[in-house]
Image (cartoon, rainbow, N blue to C red):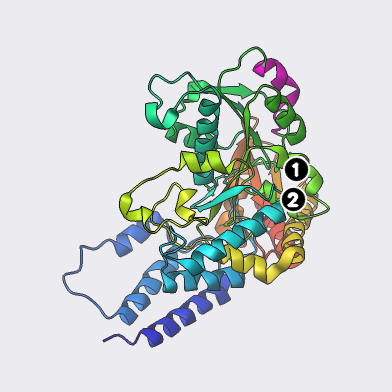
Amino acid sequence: MTNERALLERTAEIAARYLDTLDTRPIRADADYDAMLAAVDRPVPEEGLDPADVIEELARLAEPGLVAMGSGRYYGFVIGGALPSSLAADWLVSAWDQNTGLAQVTPAASALEAVTGRWVLELLGLPAHSSFAFVTGCQMAHVTSLAAARHAQYDRIGYDLPARGLAGAPPLRVVVGGKRHVTLTRALQLLGIGAEQEVVVPVDDQGRMRVELLADILAGDDAPTIVCLQAGEVNTGTFDDLATGIAVAHDVGAWVHVDGAFGLWAATSPGLAHLVAGHADADSWATDAHKWLNVPYDCGIAICAHPLMHAAAMEYAAPYLDVAKAAERDPMGFSPEFSRRARSLPAWAAIRALGRRGVAAMIESSCASARGIAEGLVAIPGCELLNDVVLNQVLVRFEDDARTSAIVAAVQQEGEAWMSPTVWDDRAAIRISVSCWRTDEDDVRRTVAAFARAAVAY
Ligand SMILES: Cc1ncc(COP(=O)(O)O)c(C=O)c1O
């Protein structure tokens, strides 16, 4: 019989030891995927193993292939780390193992989720009456919000989408910016809205939708329409002019959805909130807690200003559930998932630990680090800054694609920091996303120094 307590304490020790290495271990993994697969690929074991030995084995096997994503010098994609509070809460979520679908069945988790959602609305400056769902990530938040949008736009023209389905429905027009995130298109496709139904609005040199073109694009067609705006472009961190875009779209009865995977968190800081001006007038928003709120994977948030449309798009019915359905908020009623973990609780813990001021300070600190990195990098001969560093994203390149690629590869390989290669204006570029709560001045200094070393070598 396993001693469960001893197992969990040992697991906590292994986890803490890993976290202790974050400041000193290489950010990249030592072993690549092929090496890892070769090391772990085995047939189904015939016999079991004591759980304590299983955990030791798991930790030993995984170690060479772990990437220090929680380090203050991991700047890849837009990832974020895990605050101590949110990490610890995540452990409790697993220990409690509450299938958080129905309020009466999981009262603690459901009530905490209701409050977490309210806190998020308040922090992000969104309408208090909005509905929300805690989903796996921003992409699924898009799916959820856009399902509500699709439902509402068909409802507007009297077409019963849940009953009649998409086949035979009048076409739905979706207007997007040229630099929309790939997950938006993917979410639309999951909802049966094809790439050719996307009307693409050109963008400016920072990736902002040219909203001055929107009125002409929308004019003279009252088809069901969804306009997707962006708060935080993945390469530059730039924001569409939300106030103008929303007003123009609403003039023709369109639904406005905002992709704010990380950028929406600018609303939490008095000094940055101007970037999202007007955002509260949109109809739905998608964001992540697992990026900039520094909650462990996975936690995205779909938010909708029209709770009835949101709920109608997620409608489910089963007599065996009706007996447990609550008059109050059932998480399942707003989420595309049926069974689901209580993934809002780590977000609750993060906000509880930081408070309103702490959340703002974390966001502002990332932005200050991004500016510090940008300043350091442009001082390196040949380095060109490609974006206005308005948020947490820094976009640079060197004289030509070969040097840019060589330098980012060298920095990654040295292990001091990790950032994503990207493409901007058809040329190789390097994107540095500062999204981890741990990033401090020393990380900024070490990152710039790593680039300087690589620039001398290549
Ligand atoms: C602007 C934007 N939207 C959506 C996403 C997708 O988020 P997720 O990976 O949580 O689905 C990202 C991810 O980086 C993003 O930057």
Local SS, label 1:
helix
Q: Image point 36% across, 59% down: which residue?
A: 35
Label 2 amino acid?
Answer: Ala
Q: Is residue 215 magenta?
A: yes
Q: Image point 56% across, 65% down: which residue?
A: 112
Q: Which quadrant of the figure has residue 397?
A: top right
The answer to whether the residues at label 1 and label 2 have Cβ atoms under 8 Å apart is yes
Magenta stretch bounds:
207-218
415 and 61: which one is in front? 61
User: Which residue matches tag 2?
Assistant: 267
81 and 153: which one is in front? 153
User: Which residue matches tag 1?
Assistant: 276
Ligand 1 sits in quadrant: top right
In the depicted structure, whether residue 456 falls above or below residue 207: below
Q: Marks 1 and 2, how far apart in space?
A: 6 Å
Which secondary structure type mostly characterizes the magenta part of the structure? helix
Residue 430, position in %: x, y?
A: 64, 44
